[in-house]
Amino acid sequence: SFSPSLLRFTSHTARFSFRSIRAMASHIVGYPRMGPKRELKFALESFWDGKSTADDLQKVAADLRSSVWKQMANVGIKFIPSNTFSYYDQVLDTTAMLGAVPSRYNWNGGEIGFDVYFSMARGNASVPAMEMTKWFDTNYHYIVPELGPEIKFSYASHKALGVDTVPVLVGPVSYLLLSKPAKGVEKSFSLLSLISKILPVYKEVVAELKAAGATWIQFDEPTLVMDLDSHQLEAFTNAYSELESSLSGLNVLIETYFADVTPEAYKTLNSLKGVTGYGFDLVRGTKTLELVKGGFPLDKYLFAGLVDGRNIWANDLASSLTTLQTLEGIVGKDKLVVSTSCSLLHTAVDLVNETKLDDEIKSWLAFAAQKIVEVNALAKALSGHKDEAYFSSNAAAQASRKSSPRVTNETVQKAADGLKGSDHRRATNVSARLGAQQKKFGLPMLPTTTIGSFPQTMDLRRVRREYKAKKISEDDYVKSIKEEINKVVKLQEELDIDVLVHGEPERNDMVEYFGEQLSGFAFTLNGWVQSYGSRCVKPPIIYGDISRPKAMTVSWSSMAQSMTKRPMKGMLTGPVTILNWSFVRNDQPRFETCYQIALAIKDEVEDLEKAGITVIQIDEAALREGLPLRKSEQEFYLKWAVHSFRITNCGVQDTTQIHTHMCYSHFNDIIHSIIDMDADVITIENSRSDEKLLSVFREGVMYGAGIGPGVYDIHSPRIPSSEEIAERINKMLAVLESNILWVNPDCGLKTRKYSEVKPALSNMVAAAKLLRTQL
Ligand code: GLN
Ligand code: ZN
């Protein structure tokens, strides 16, 4: 269980002293928890599998925490965060701290142990997990607190709060704003009304920290970068006035990140009671600098987030130093602290472990371990102790990145420039196209298809691994994949599916597969970033102009098409998804990089068409993920994102059917952009939220394109019956014209077993066939 004495910071090896803040201090908002080699992931998974004990897990965690603290202390960081470690998620930790455990987890007060904690995170045999959702616009996911009017908060769980560090807490207002009303709670219930109930717990925590000797405390209030109304802003004012007396004697940092704060939020912040300093993201928050220039409260500290926590690029130290000098003129030397733009949780851990990247590219990069060195070097430089050698090697790396022929490809630059401001659309409208396609394919009503991938067996993964390691020959590899494709094609024919897929056996990951074949991408060995719990992703790095040396999927798709008379979908990942799931270069706007990817995918689309592939699916699983946090920026993003998608397929014939797929259904607010993608058929996830989709469907009717809302959930091993699927399709038919409805699962089948996929798809086809007879 969570034993406070074990979790508490006990290491005496590191009494980091920042008691006297000398001129120019350095601060880190937060640090990755996984460890440089994903030690925490493996410890967690082994514990969950019953292969190791709670003690083993706690030992790994304690080692990770103290090594991070030591690392920062050695570098010279003054304000070292603590409590940013988590066994799963920092918002869940706050829920545990507040004792806000939903009743279904049968917690009976007292210390919250691993059993209750991990049940909330992951569910257990009898109770499902709490909901998880995206942390702002990152790929990190947090566990959403469920709060109702009856909730009782109590200080339930201590965490690792090192007194010589800066303990970090999710701030009370952001905690509530990131929560959702518990099931069955009336719509009118205001989460913010719970503020008076949670503040007493925060006061207890603060009192304990004070008693333990803490001198600083950091409240993360990232919701301050959102579009907040005056009522929400007032909640901050009131909460911190209420906390003021408890906070007295402590230095309090309010940390914001991921965007600039609005002028209103800035005003609110500056007038908060009991607060000593503010942290701003000066990388994404491009307008915040202007706000600070317009006035900053005397006596307060400014924590300047100049080192990007969302990316892997080395900081341009000379330029950061200039910004710091400007800030120094405003807030004063002794009130300026150099910091990261946000927690380093969102970047990779340590470049040291990248033995496969060449030296040139490596010189352009900084992962978390390198970023803390940058922060410290900037702080020292500003206080007159500039490390000249370090700064000049940084300048040299910046210069080499600017001039490297590996980065710039004039032809690509020109082609992408030519796209701006122009419109790219297919020549005819969707109804005319669908008519032409129907004539050609003669598909039945309610045509059936799948999203692309079929189960990836151990054998299959082994074949790919051995080929990559050059342990098997190309011929053997192609033979194995061909057999796999053949198996998948035969299976789909037996199941009587209408539009087939090749099953994607050659792909490890839908972005990596394309990145590896495009110029301008680099790959890391250990550049993992936590996505949720023990799950990490390893985004490719886009460092240069993107081009496609040769066709990427045509041979596999043609091979698959040659095995069947039915239409075989060519399967591509769309430009926006490739962009949003990569570390993107920061030396040109994101849309420019996206246009370049779009041109590469366009070449692929056209090659597929030439090879006789008549249905092409371009997945945009991550289109929504790139949506900026602030409404004012969303339209611009959607415009270039949708434009990029259209560029990929604007040149195909009417009879070539373009599908797209998206892994979510919450797009009521962006439905016009989805329509503007102008795809012929769109398949989406649906099984979890029928109700919300209805309104989207209604618009779909006007749109005229084919729509395939998933008829069953592929995230669960459960096999849906044909009755159940038929009922679901019937519900859709109540709102949608039968001639535009497609029948397909929610998403790819990659993570499922054949023993689940075969009966599920068989039931799906049976349901479609049954309903066809009733139309
Ligand atoms: N075509 C991909 C697959 O089927 C789509 C995956 C996704 O949408 N995440 O696996
Ligand atoms: Zn999907």
Image (tube, rainbow, N blue to C red):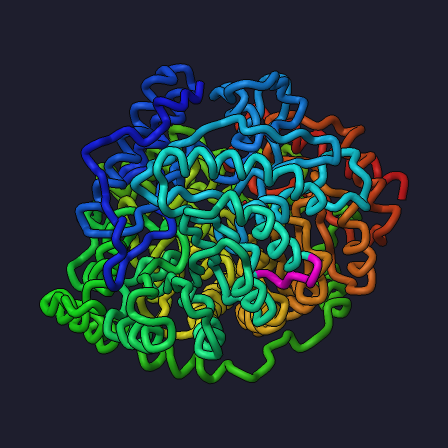
User: In this rendering, does residue 168 appear at all?
Assistant: yes
User: Which of these two is toward me, 714 or 159?
Assistant: 159
Q: Is residue 390 above or below residue 273?
A: below
Horizontal side of residue 616 vs 159, given as left or right: right
Q: Position of residue 435 (x, y in %)?
A: 76, 64
User: In this rendering, does residue 652 appear at all?
Assistant: no
Quarter that holds the N terminus: top left
Dividing the picture into quadrants, the one containing residue 526 is: top left
Q: Is residue 729 above or below residue 559?
A: above
Q: Position of residue 297 (x, y in %)?
A: 46, 69
Q: How many marks on residues?
A: 0
Q: Is residue 541 above or below residue 151?
A: below
Horizontal side of residue 186 vs 755, given as left or right: right
Q: Is residue 547 above or below residue 580?
A: below
**Residue ID at (33%, 71%):** 332
Q: Residue furthest toward the left? A: 389
> Which residue range is magenta in the image?
226-231
Q: Position of residue 601 (x, y in %)?
A: 47, 65
**Residue ID at (38%, 52%):** 29
